[in-house]
Image (cartoon, coloured by chain):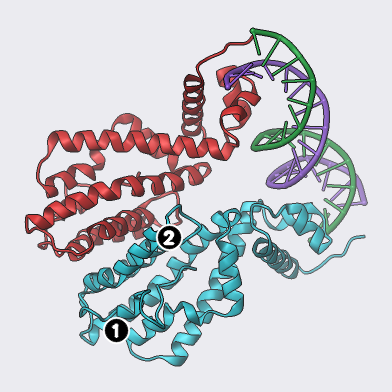
Chain colours: A cyan, B red, C purple, D green
DNA sequence: GTCTATAGTAGGATAGAC
DNA sequence: GTCTATCCTACTATAGAC
C-alpha cells in the first residue's frame, strides 16, 4: 500500500526517526533498512529526500545543533546578566536536561564519531558569535581586552572541544584533566582578563565545570 | 601462483599501495578490490594484515604522520637556531616538497575527509611536544611567558588547524583569511610575546605563510 | 604462519514501474 | 512521491596450497 504525505511532513518524519535511531543505537550501526522499517516506508523514499546516508546525517546534525543552541540561548537570556555570569551559564554542563545528557552519552560511543565530530563543528559555528558578543561586552566593561573577539571565541570553542572531548579523539583521561586545568589560564591570557576571572571553569572547583563537551 | 614474502615487507607493500591509491583517488572511492588488484594479491591477504578497511586507514595515517613530522624535524634541526626562527621553519608552508603539496590537494577532496581529519589529530599529537619545547626555550630566553607551554601548543595547533583547514570543514574563504589574519595576535597574547614577534605568520606578508594546513 | 580462491551476507545506492 | 527489484562493495567464512 502506498500512503502519500506532504513533502515537508515526510522529510521531518524521516529526519526525526533517523535522529532517534542514531542516538538509540549509533550512526554506524543504524542501517537505512532500520529507518525504513521503523517508519514503514520503502528505501527509495528515504533516498528521494536525502541523497545518501551521509546527507541524512548532515540534516540530523543541523537539526540537533539548531535545537541545542536555541535552548541554551533561552536560559542565558533568562537567568543571567553581565558577560562573565552569562558565560558561566552558557558553558555550564550541569544545566543540561536529562535528554541532553543521554544524547551526550550516546555521542561518546565509537559508532557516533562522525556524528559527534560534525555536531561539534556545527556548534562552534553557532556558539562563536554568541560567545564573541559576550567578549565584546566584557571589553566594553573593562573586564577583557582583545582586538579579535570572534577569533578568540572560535579558537577557544574549537580548540577546547577538540582537546577535551572524550570519545572522538584518542586522548587519555589524564590528558583531558591536564588540559582542563589549564583552561582558565588560557582563557584569561587570550582575553587579558584578571587572573581568577575564569576560575569557575576549573574542573577541580565545586559546582563548576568545563566549557562543554557536547 | 603464490609468492610468499616477509610479513613486514608484505604489510608495508599493502600500506603504501593503499596510501598511493587514497591520495590518487580518495579513501572513499578506493575499494579493497583496487588494492588487491594493484598488488596482484588476494583479498584475504589484505584482511590477514588489516582487520578492516578502517584499520588499514589507521595504519596509513600513522605512516603519513610519522613521515611528515620526521621530515619537518630534520629541516628544523638543520637550518635554524633560536625558538622563533625554528617556529618559523616548523610552520613554513612554502618549505613543503612537491609530493607534500599534491598530497595536501588530495586531502582536501570530499572523499578524504576521514583520512584528513584523522591525520590532523595524529599531527597535533606529534607536533605539540615539539612546539611546546620551543615555547619552553622561548620562555627561558625571556621571549615568552606562560605557565602552560604544552597546553598552549595543543590549543594553537588544534584550534588553528580546525579553523583554517579548507576541505574538512565548511568555512568560506573569507572566514579562513579573517582567522589567519588574527593568528599572530592570538599567538602573541597566549605566549605574552612582544607584539610583532609572530608577524611572519601573517598571510598578508610576503614570504610568510600561515601555520600549516596539513 | 602465509597466501589464494571462491562463495556468500549485509547494507548503501539506483532505475524504473506505478 | 512511492515502491520493487537490482546492483555494487565491504566484509566474512571456508577450504586448502605452500
Which structural element holds mark 1?
helix
* Nearest to the observer: residue D5 or residue A143: A143
Residue B28 visible in the displayed image: no
Specify the farthest residue to the left: B141
Q: Quadrant of the N terminus of chain B?
A: top right
Q: Is residue A89 left or right of residue A137?
A: right
**How far across and how far down the image is residue A9, in percent?**
74, 70
* Nearest to the observer: residue B16 or residue B166: B16
Q: CA distance from mark 2 to mark 1?
A: 35 Å
Q: Are marks 2 and 1 on the same chain?
A: yes
Q: Is residue A152 left or right of residue A90?
A: left
Chain label for disc 1: A
Q: Quadrant of the C terminus of chain B?
A: top left
**How far across and how far down the image is residue B111, in percent?**
53, 42
Residue B147 visible in the displayed image: yes
Chain label for disc 2: A
Q: Is residue B160 above or below residue B25?
A: below
Q: Which residue is mark 2?
A: A173
Residue for point 39% across, 62% down: A176
Which structural element holds mark 2?
helix
Q: Which residue is mark 1?
A: A137
Amino acid at each position: 500500500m502506498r500512503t502519500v504525505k506532504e513533502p515537508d511532513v515526510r522529510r521531518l518524519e524521516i529526519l526525526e526517526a533517523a535522529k532517534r535511531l542514531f542516538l538509540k543505537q549509533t550512526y554506524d550501526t543504524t542501517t537505512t533498512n532500520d529507518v525504513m522499517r521503523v517508519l514503514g516506508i520503502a528505501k527509495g523514499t528515504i533516498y528521494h529526500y536525502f541523497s545518501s546516508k551521509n546527507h541524512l546525517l548532515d540534516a540530523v546534525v543541523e537539526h540537533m545543533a539548531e535545537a541545542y543552541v536555541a535552548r541554551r540561548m533561552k536560559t542565558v537570556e533568562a537567568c543571567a546578566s553581565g558577560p562573565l555570569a552569562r558565560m558561566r551559564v552558557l558553558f555550564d554542563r550541569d544545566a543540561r536536561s536529562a535528554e541532553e545528557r543521554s544524547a551526550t552519552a550516546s555521542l561518546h560511543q565509537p559508532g557516533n564519531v562522525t556524528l559527534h565530530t560534525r555536531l561539534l563543528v556545527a556548534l562552534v559555528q553557532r556558539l562563536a558569535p554568541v560567545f564573541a558578543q559576550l567578549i565584546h561586552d566584557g571589553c566594553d566593561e573593562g573586564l577583557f581586552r582583545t582586538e579579535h573577539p570572534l577569533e578568540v571565541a572560535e579558537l577557544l570553542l574549537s580548540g577546547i572541544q577538540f582537546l577535551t572531548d572524550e570519545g572522538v579523539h584518542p586522548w587519555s583521561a589524564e590528558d583531558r584533566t591536564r588540559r582542563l586545568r589549564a583552561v582558565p589560564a588560557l582563557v584569561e591570557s587570550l582575553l587579558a582578563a584578571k587572573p581568577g576571572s575564569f576560575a569557575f571553569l576549573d574542573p577541580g572547583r565545586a559546582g563548576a565545570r568545563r566549557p562543554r563537551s557536547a
